[in-house]
Amino acid sequence: MEWIDICFNLTHESFNKERDEVLERAREAGVSWMLITGADAHQSEKCLEIADQYPDCCRATLGVHPHLAKQWTDAIAARFSDLARADANVVAMGEMGLDYNRDFSPRPQQRIAFEAQLELAADLGLPVFLHERDAHHDFAQILRRWRDKVPAAVVHCFTGEADALAEYLDLDCHIGITGWVCDERRGTHLHPLVRTIPPGRLMIETDAPYLLPRTLPKGTGKKIGNGRRNEPAFLPHIGEYVAQLRDETPEDLAAHTTATARAFYNLPPASGE
């Protein structure tokens, strides 16, 4: 089976000393492509450096996360535009969106940065990688104004309710599901919802090093801080869990989520195909 991880925070410091080993474990697990996710200006440039270093398995996104929206400037927009036009390894804009759960950046600044990045993506003709938490109404209102101007959109790490999922699907968005769905404390409401995501709209992701699936054996993952590190090699576990919820075989789920991610990000076939 072949898998594609649409969100991997490979710039996280916990990966700095073993990047090659982590990528090799991912490939051994059947993960052919990993999307390295940008969250601010500096990290986005680092994502692209990594994608350029590992062009056989990595691609980059450029974006400013809503937590860091207060950093957004016209200069960052110009820099992202230059990078995206110069390097085909940039395959999407993001991570962008709204997060009213923590409000690390003031909400008005989040909305300004979100809309500015949507405008940039539209200008570049790139899909968008989106973050929304506890901000469904404002997020959908802004996205609706831009949805027909960007080629594709994925709401990553979806953790919302049925009404939000229905509206995102109505907006022709793709949906990213993480190991959150494996969490018996907060993810069980997603179990009936993942069944309703049509093939062709569903993608899966680790969001590594975060969100290590709680259904993995105890002690899985390298210890970091007060927890354990997720990595793309665990993506098949998430896929198998989601397949069970959808009454699909892992092979079928891997086939359609991989085809969807490859089309969304315009990724080459796996080597050997």
Image (cartoon, helix red, strand yellow):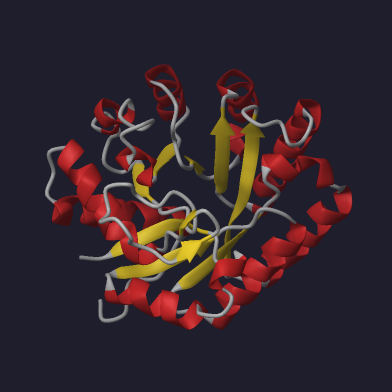
Identify which residue, 25 or 86, lies in the foreground.
Answer: 25
Q: Would you identify the image quadrant in which residue 137 lies?
A: top right
Asked whether, in this view, residue 238 is left or right of residue 68, the answer is: left
Asked whether, in this view, residue 263 is left or right of residue 127, the answer is: left
Identify which residue, 129 or 100, lies in the foreground.
Answer: 100
Q: Which residue lies at the image location 22% right of the left edge and 46% below the top edge?
A: 241
Q: Which residue lies at the image location 60% right of the left edge and 24% below the top edge?
A: 135
Q: Is residue 222 above or below residue 78?
A: below
Quarter in which the N terminus is drawn:
bottom left
Quarter in which the C terminus is drawn:
bottom left
Q: Which residue lies at the image location 70% right of the left edge and 37% below the top edge?
A: 114
How many numbered tags mark residues here? 0
Residue 116 in percent (x, y) is at: 76, 40
Residue 219 can be seen, yes or no? yes
Q: Is residue 149 above or below residue 43?
A: above
Asked whether, in this view, residue 48 is left or right of residue 179, the answer is: right
Q: Is residue 42 above or below residue 23?
A: above
Q: Which residue lies at the image location 20% right of the left edge and 51% below the top edge?
A: 240
